[in-house]
Each structure stands twice: as structure tokens, then as C-alpha cells.
Amino acid sequence: MKRALAILTLITTLVAAPRPASAATRAADPSYRTLSAAHHPDWMRTVPDATSLATLSLPGTHDTMAIHGGGPTQTQEDFGDSGGTLTAQLAAGLRMIDIRARVNGGNTFTIHHGAVYQNANFDDVLDRLAAFLSAHPTETVVMRLKQECTGELGSCTDVPGQLSFPDIFDLYAAKRPDLFWQPAVQRGSAAATPALGAIRGKLVLAVLHGAFGGPIEHYGLTQFADWNGTSTYVQDNYNVPNIGAIATKRDQVRRFLDATDTGDPTKMYVNFASGASAFVQPQWCAGGALWVQGVNPFLLDYLNQGHITHRTGMVLMDFPGGGLIDRLISFNPGFSASA
């Protein structure tokens, strides 16, 4: 009986929930699905070298490469396969990315969201990052890399007979010593939080996550050694069980923003604005559904009301709009809108 009721509820939700807005409607929303309205390829240029990574306000994307699979799986606007979407995000000003990888044949990584291959490989990700950072050497990009496959229903399964996830990562890092900020890719010791001057032109690994959550080895930054879901410095309450619960997710994002703004200035804060479930698609949580305001328009309104005065930390979003990206970047010390 409970299973039948759950299925009926899911069908009702899918039928009742709004379809994606038309292109004309989306173009009017500065918080949602208007990524290309922002253009900040060099916004870090005017930020002082001595600025700590913890001080920066970094707009980012949750499940950065997820453009395929339809409503339940897609989390970002589609600007092309093989990393084209990543290039568009970087040009817009996004500086934190969330990459999900499957172990594939030949000791390689392919990019997935759950069971859905995203028509990109890890080499595509690194190629796009290297090209961008070479062309814009004042910038840095922070990356969370997660082993995506659990082998469970709805997930992917790693190809057997390959090296371990960290061993394969080491192969990639060894081939690109000029791309990675080296202190963060040492397997045996995590790195202290750097200043911007030390990481310009580099890719900074924040954490290497295993398939079931916890960090692998000691890669990344010391502060994130205990990043396993939501913690003092990470808000990742991703389960939004129904459309009405989008309001709860909005409040979680708001409370964590407030904590970031008034918290320890030496600590990095990571705030996931994303959420979903079997009954709520990522696009509904981000943009709103039925009578419930989405996280993205709420977030932009909240920032514009002046509640945050110092920093937002790292904010990872689904379907971010150009105006929301602009506003997040504006909190950075020394930021110039012309950059």
C-alpha cells in the first residue's frame, strides 16, 4: 500500500509540476538559467594577491557537467559536450566546480551523474581548465572531485580490473604538473589554505571524495579532511522530499550564508544551493515550482537586501543566472565590475 501511494504521489507531482519556462521567460530571470548573461573571465585580476582563499566569495556549480539525462538528472544549462559547458561557466565567472567521475577502461575517468554518462571525459575537463587558466592567468579554479559510482540502483558501476580511484587520479595529476597546484595533490599530506597569489593560474583540488562520501587519503586542503556531507563548514542538505520542502532548503542556504558572513574569517565555507529527490527535480529546486519560490531567486533577493556584508563563501548552484553570478562575485575585495 505504501509503495502504491508513493508511486501515485510521484505521478501526481510530475504531472502537476510546472514545465520548464520558455526561453523568453528565462531570459528575464537574472537568477536562473541565464548563465551567458554574466561575463567575468578575469574578475580575480583586481583582487589582491594576499587575499586568502577563505576570504573569497566564489560562485560555483553543483554537478558541474550534468547536462544530459533530462529533468531528474540535468543540473546545468547545456553549452556543449566534451567540456563546452565548463568553458561557458568559467567565462561567466564561476570558480568552483564539482566533478563526478566513473572509473573506465584503460585506467581513465569518464564524467557521470548517476548512471548517465555526460558525454565528457576527465581529460576534457582538464583540457578546458588548462586552456582557460592559460588564457586568464590571474584566475584560479577550485575543484571537488568525487567518485560517482556506487553500483547501486540508479548509479553507475566502475569498470572492474582497473587501478583504484586515487591511483588513477595520480596518473592524471602526474601528466599535468603545471595545471594542478601541487601542495593539494600530494596523497600523504593535505595543504593549508592558500592566498590567491600562490594559486593564480592553477587548479586547486579541495577534496577527493569516495563513492560513499568520505575523503580519500589526504588529498586537497586540510580544512576539508572531514568533509563528509553537511558539517560545520559545509552545507549539503541535498534531499528535498517534496515541492513544499524547497522552502526548507532556501532557509538552510540562508542560515549558512549568515554563518559564513559572521564566522571564522580563516575558514572556508561551502554552501550547496542545490537539492532534489524522486519528487523534486533539480530545476524545480533552483528555479521554483508551482507556488514555491526557488532557491536561486530567493538567494539573489536575499543578497540584494543587504543581509550579507563581508563574504558568501563558496556557493554551488544548479542552473545559475547571470545576475546571481554577478552579485556573488561583487562581494570580493578589490572586485571591479569591468574585469
Image: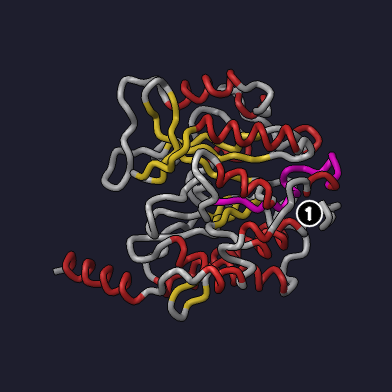
Q: Position of residue 275 (x, y in %)?
A: 46, 60
Q: Residue furthest bottom?
A: 291
- Could one spot residue 214 in this view of the protein? no
Residue at 68% x, 28% y is: 181
Which residues make up the magenta segment?
Answer: 47-61
- Main SS of residues in magenta: loop
| Relative vertical location of residue 84 with respect to residue 242 in this rendering, above or below | above
Image point 34% across, 65% down: which residue?
Answer: 279
Query: Which secondary structure lies at badge 1?
Result: loop
Number of residue marks: 1
Q: For mark 1, does the 10 Å Cα neighbourhood hold few (<14), some (14 to 19), or many (20 or more) residues?
A: many
Q: Position of residue 85 (x, y in %)?
A: 55, 47
Q: 209 or 304: which is nearer to us?
A: 304
The residue shown at (34%, 76%) is 16
Q: Amino acid at mark 1?
A: Asn
Question: x, y (%) of residue 70?
Answer: 38, 56
Label 1 sits on residue:
332
Q: Quadrant of residue 191?
A: top right
Left or right, residue 61 beside residue 121: right
How is the rendered protein coloured?
A: secondary structure
